[in-house]
Amino acid sequence: MSTPVTLALTTVGSEEDAARIARHLVETKAAACVSIVAPVRSFYVWKGVFQDEREWLLLIKTSRPAGEVRDLLRAVHPYEVPEFLAFPASYADEAYAKWVAEGSGGA
């Protein structure tokens, strides 16, 4: 049986916030690894106003339940409504998956 891995993502408005959140998620074992992809350009409507913003994308690798990671993220995220999407990996190398599980409290 393979070890489950989830890839979750969120965005924030500054590199500093991205690094702070990434460090928090790894230090609390909510994630084994967080990669910051930056900057990305996001277009959306917020409270009736069109937005064209630079954001930093965080790719969160974990074996923890998505709801737990979401709750830890919400506690430190600066946005009123943070983006949080989680995708179970359809495949992960077993050695990598075990490392993710060990690093995110799942082993």
Image (tube, rainbow, N blue to C red):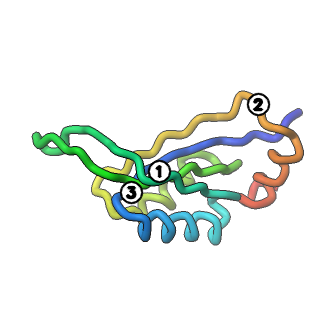
Other residues around mark 1 within 10 Å, as few (<14) / some (14–19) / many (≥20): many
Residue at the disc numbered 3: 12
Q: Residue at 28%, 56% (x, y): give it.
A: 80
In the image, what residue occupies the spot 15% across and 40% down? 50
- Left or right: 68 with respect to 106? left
Q: Earlier in the sequence, mark 2 or mark 3?
A: 3
Residue ID at (36%, 51%): 82
Q: Position of residue 72 (x, y in %)?
A: 51, 61
Q: Is residue 60 left or right of residue 95?
A: left
Where is 34 relative to 84, above or below? below
Q: Residues within 10 Å of mark 2 (few under 14, many from 20)?
A: few
Residue at numbered disc 1:
57
User: In which quadrant of the rendered image does the N terminus lie?
Assistant: top right
Image location of residue 38, percent across then percent down: 46, 54
Q: Are marks 1 and 3 in contact (CB under 8 Å)?
A: no
Q: Nearer the viewer, residue 42 or 65?
A: 42
The residue tagged with tag 2: helix, strand or loop? Answer: loop
**Badge 3: few (under 14), some or many (20 or more) residues near its Cα, within 10 Å?**
many
Image height check: is 76 above or below 11?
Answer: below
Q: Where is the C terminus found, in terms of image quarters?
A: bottom right
Residue type of the residue flagged with mark 3:
Val
Q: Amino acid at mark 2?
A: Tyr
* Mark found first going from the N terminus, 1 or 3: 3
**Residue at point 42%, 58% (across, down):** 74
Q: CA distance from mark 1 to mark 2?
A: 22 Å
Count of marks placed on residues: 3
Residue position marked by numbered label 2 in the rendering: 91
